[in-house]
Image: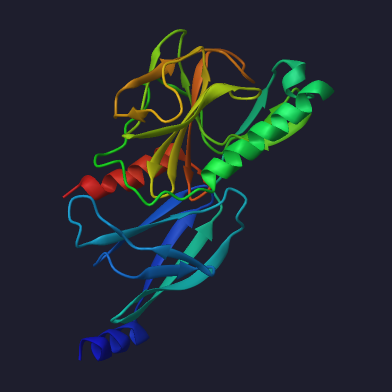
Amino acid sequence: MKILFLLFFTAYFALAYEVGNGKVLLLPLGSAKGVVTLNEVNRTVLPQPLNPELGFVLLPIDYYALPSLIQGQWSTNDGNLSLSVEILRVPYPTEVLVVESSKVTPPPETLERIATEKAEAEKIYATYNPIRYWDKPFIRPIESITTSEYGSARTYNGVLKSYHGGVDFRAKTPLPILASNDGVVVLAKDRYYSGGTVIVDHGEGIYTCYFHFSQLDVKVGDKVTQGQSIGLSGATGRITGPHLHFGVMVYGVQSDPINFMEQINSLFKR
């Protein structure tokens, strides 16, 4: 009877959502069972932190995603519930920056290093760790004003064009930078573009990224707790001045960290 009711119900009703490119959509669900399929990608339903009997799924949308309508479903042993997600285009701002010329046109001897560091990071982000380390809302790594938003269309030295994959916070040097939540350090080193870099794995496909450190206070394999200092702010890598770049990767997709925190922290509001 339960299955028949669910199938009858879903024939006339579907859950509909909207989300912008570069944002994360959090779908709260009535149970922690089953799989959500969108665009032929399956995501296991995860238990909510305050009530494990309820579930949720995170759906990160790529920055370059075009406006479209995605159809999908939530499948459990009791039946299927139809889902639709409309992707909207966000009007991100534009920035013109001037940086050291070698950070726009790297010397030939640095190209192998850059390629190696890129591959190293991509391998990390593509790794799904099923263990959940976080059990509280995420926090900002520093209390400061935002100097550059996620998604800003950027032109460097009038040549290189890209988009900003995180949020920049003003950070005089040196100031302690805090872990946004509990996790395990999976990268801690100096890199060509991001300078002193720390990446923390929070489990379940969530990583936070911290760039431009002047000093690193953690190493790979260290367990960190929310609010712990992981290093000191600086002006290393491709920069226009001292600041902290804070980024979030969800299932390998570079996502707006402020939007991500708003979404994931909503799970802690009763």
Q: Residue at x 32, y 34 (%)?
A: 181
**How many numbered dots are placed on residues in this image?**
0
Q: Is residue 184 above or below residue 191?
A: below
Classify residue 56 by image quadrant.
bottom left
Q: Residue at x 24, y 67 (%)?
A: 31
Residue 158 position, x and y percent, is 77, 26
Direction right: furthest residue: 108
Q: Residue at x 38, y 28 (%)?
A: 222
Q: Residue at x 59, y 15 (%)?
A: 236
Residue 155 position, x and y percent, is 71, 30
Classify residue 175 by image quadrant.
top left
Q: Is residue 240 above or below residue 28?
A: above
Residue 77 visible, this orientation? yes
Check the image and tell me how it is coloured: rainbow
Residue 227 position, x and y percent, is 29, 24
Residue 107 visible, this orientation? no
